[in-house]
Amino acid sequence: MENKKRRGRQKIPMKKIEKQDDLYASFSKRRLGLHKKASDLVFECDVDIGMIYFSPKGNPFSFFHPNVDAVVSRFQNLDIKFSESALLVTAGNREKVNELKNRLDELDIIEDIAIAKKKSYDDVIEARKRGWWESIEQLNASEVTKFEAWMDTTIFNMQNRLNELKNGASSS
């Protein structure tokens, strides 16, 4: 394979984006990134955070954790002692965020497994299209093991179907 010189990630100079479509697209991407970073900061560092900003079109956006009232009250008076109910609401919100984050992590793992299974099935289908006699010598050890398992399953299913047909023919 030919060695190509790659430039890698390049630093983009900060300057105002002039084209409106590019500006809207950049804002949308950066807004999502900003929310993700704020969420990570809350999860990893257990902090309260609040952001309010406006899009280039003038639409308002915000991110508050645990909630608007707690962040604003704390900002207005740093020495404020929260009531027991406010502390409970804050703790409940933090727990809910942690539960949702854990569930999201579980779903990400399930998605990764499903993607790997689909790729494996796609590989088997591609091998079927080529014909096993054409492609079997190109398989690595892992692929041979998968192919062997597929063959064993196919033989088992065929034997079961033959038995069903024999039993159905003999009972008629």
Image: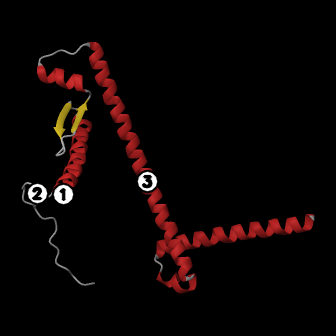
In the picture of the structure, the residue carrying the numbered disc 1 is 22
Q: Quadrant of residue 21?
A: bottom left
Q: Quadrant of residue 44?
A: top left
Residue type indicated by callout 2: Glu
Answer with left or right where residue 123 lies relative to residue 160.
left
Residue 59 pos. (x, y %): 21, 40
Residue type indicated by callout 3: Glu
Residue type indicated by callout 1: Asp
The answer to the question of whether label 1 and label 2 lie on touching residues, with beta carbons closer than 8 A, is yes
Residue at 25% of width from left, 47% of height from top?
32
Residue at 21% of width from left, 82% of height from top?
3
Answer few, some or many: residues within 10 Å of disc 2's Cα (few below 14, many 20 plus, some between 14 and 19): few
Q: Which mark is residue 166?
A: none
Query: CA separation, marks 3 and 2?
Result: 39 Å
Answer with left or right where residue 7 lies relative to residue 88.
left
Pair 3/2: label in front: 2
Which quadrant, please, contains the C terminus? bottom right
Residue at 23% of width from left, 22% of height from top?
69
In the picture of the structure, the residue carrying the numbered disc 2 is 18
